[in-house]
């Protein structure tokens, strides 16, 4: 069984490394990591907030001291309640990534299970995510179902 732990501020650089692994795999974007330096202070602060609405769960890399094997991050958002979800607390999963040399060992599943429990403990009744075709079977096996609602996005 994988030992999952909550990410700490000291893990911030490795968290960004794994986030970059996910970005590189999912998006045709600039592969530059120059943005990491600007992101680190905020990420460290967020990882240091034990009662905040952001969390990351990780598994340490079994073969590389100081490296992470897997990462799952998520947030809880408030949305005005509705029937079946009167409190409006919604979990959102993002930055699910596993180091290429540590895949197919159950690390992402173990991290996802920890994150789902964190959502439950905080009263989230729904959890949302976007998935790559490669990752979709994992999420379906955890009970996620596709939604027909289209997502629109505006970049400000």
Image: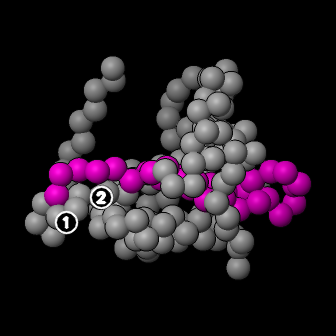
Location of residue 124 in the rendering, given as x and y in whole percent from the top left corner: 34, 64
Reply yes or no: does residue 84 show up in magenta: no
Using a 10 Å C-alpha cutoff, classify the residue at mark 2 as few (fewer than 14 neighbours), some (14 to 19) or many (20 or more): many
The structure residue drawn at horizontal position 44% and vertical position 61%, both measured from the top left corner, is 136
Can the viewer see residue 22? no
Left/right placement of residue 149 relative to residue 44 reads: left
Location of residue 43 in the rendering, given as x and y in whole percent from the top left corner: 60, 38
Residue farthest to the left, as pictured: 83
For disc 2, the marked residue is 89
When asked about the image quadrant of residue 147, the answer is bottom left
Secondary structure predominantly adopted by residues drawn in magenta:
strand
Using the image, determine if residue 103 lies above or below residue 73: below
Q: Which residues are magenta?
A: 53-81
Can the viewer see residue 39? yes
Using the image, determine if residue 75 lies above or below residue 16: below
- Quadrant of the image containing the C terminus: top left
State the count of labels: 2
Residues at marks 2 and 1 touching, judged by CB atoms closer than 8 Å: yes
For disc 1, the marked residue is 85
């Amino acid at each position: 069984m994988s030992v999952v732990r909550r990410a700490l501020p000291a893990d911030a650089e490795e968290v960004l490394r794994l986030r970059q692994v996910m970005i590189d795999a999912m998006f045709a974007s600039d592969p530059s990591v120059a943005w990491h330096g600007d992101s680190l202070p905020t990420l460290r602060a967020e990882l240091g907030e034990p009662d905040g609405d952001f969390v990351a769960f990780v598994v340490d890399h079994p073969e590389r001291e100081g490296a992470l094997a897997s990462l799952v991050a998520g947030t809880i958002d408030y949305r005005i309640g509705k029937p079946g979800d009167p409190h409006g607390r919604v979990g959102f999963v993002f930055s699910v990534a596993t180091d290429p040399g540590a895949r197919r060992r159950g690390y992402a599943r173990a991290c996802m299970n920890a994150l789902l429990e964190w959502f439950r403990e905080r009263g989230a009744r729904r959890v949302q995510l976007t998935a790559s075709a490669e990752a979709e079977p994992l999420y379906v096996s955890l009970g996620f179902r596709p939604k027909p609602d289209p997502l629109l996005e505006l970049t400000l």
